[in-house]
Amino acid sequence: MEIKFPQALTAFRYLFLCFLTIGILVSCNRRHRPFTASDRNAVKDNILRLTADVARDVSAKGPVAWLDYFDDASGFFMATDGRLAFLGYPAAKKFILDTIVKSIPSISLHWSNQQIDPLSRRMATVGADYQETLTMADRKTVAVEGYFTATACLTHQGWKLHNLH
């Protein structure tokens, strides 16, 4: 039996449409588990642990510890005093390693009044008052207070800060 090209093309189109239809039906029927109060509480607990770890490590290791908590994925940015400070993780890393650690070798960081808004199981916003005591290279100390905001996301390496303001 010989199959002619037009018949084969018609059969291929038919099979393609069948698979496409089945794929659409299966994907449309996929149910997503609702974002529950328990999920929200779990995210809040994870973000509280993240901010506690940041304060502990920055206070123990100095400003270089921030790099452990910045998301190195594309889209990372940091704004300070209403201006873009870093557009991307590489710029933040370079500035911290080349400049900040030399001028501010030590930081004592404390958070208070933390506000956490879980947006999903993998993303949340966080805001908090912060108090820092910066020890400068000449050993003088500078007290700094302000309000910190960030978007945190769950990565393959755990919770990271995707952007900071």
Image (cartoon, helix red, strand yellow):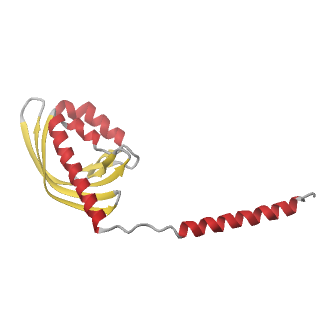
**Residue at position x 63%, y 67% in the image:** 22
Whole-percent x, y for residue 14 in the image: 75, 66
**Residue 149 in sight:** no
Question: Can you say whether 79 is above or below 136 in the image?
Answer: below
The quarter of the picture where residue 70 lies is: top left
The quarter of the picture where residue 157 lies is: top left
Whole-percent x, y for residue 162 in the image: 33, 50
**Residue 107 in sight:** yes
Seen from the viewer's position, the closer of residues 165 and 127 is 127
Q: From the viewer's perspective, is 48 left or right of 70? A: left
Seen from the viewer's position, the closer of residues 51 and 90 is 51
**Residue at position x 27%, y 59% in the image:** 42
**Residue at position x 33%, y 53% in the image:** 153
Whole-percent x, y for residue 100 in the image: 21, 35
The quarter of the picture where residue 118 lies is: bottom left
Q: From the viewer's perspective, is 89 left or right of 148? A: right
Question: Can you say whether 39 is above or below 98 in the image?
Answer: below
Whole-percent x, y for residue 25 in the image: 59, 70
What is the count of numbered marks?
0
Q: From the viewer's perspective, is 134 left or right of 119? A: left
Seen from the viewer's position, the closer of residues 24 and 149 is 24
Question: Where does the N terminus fall, quadrant-wise?
Answer: bottom right
Question: Can you say whether 126 is above or below 137 in the image?
Answer: below
As drawn, which residue projects farthest toward the right? 1
**Residue at position x 86%, y 62% in the image:** 6
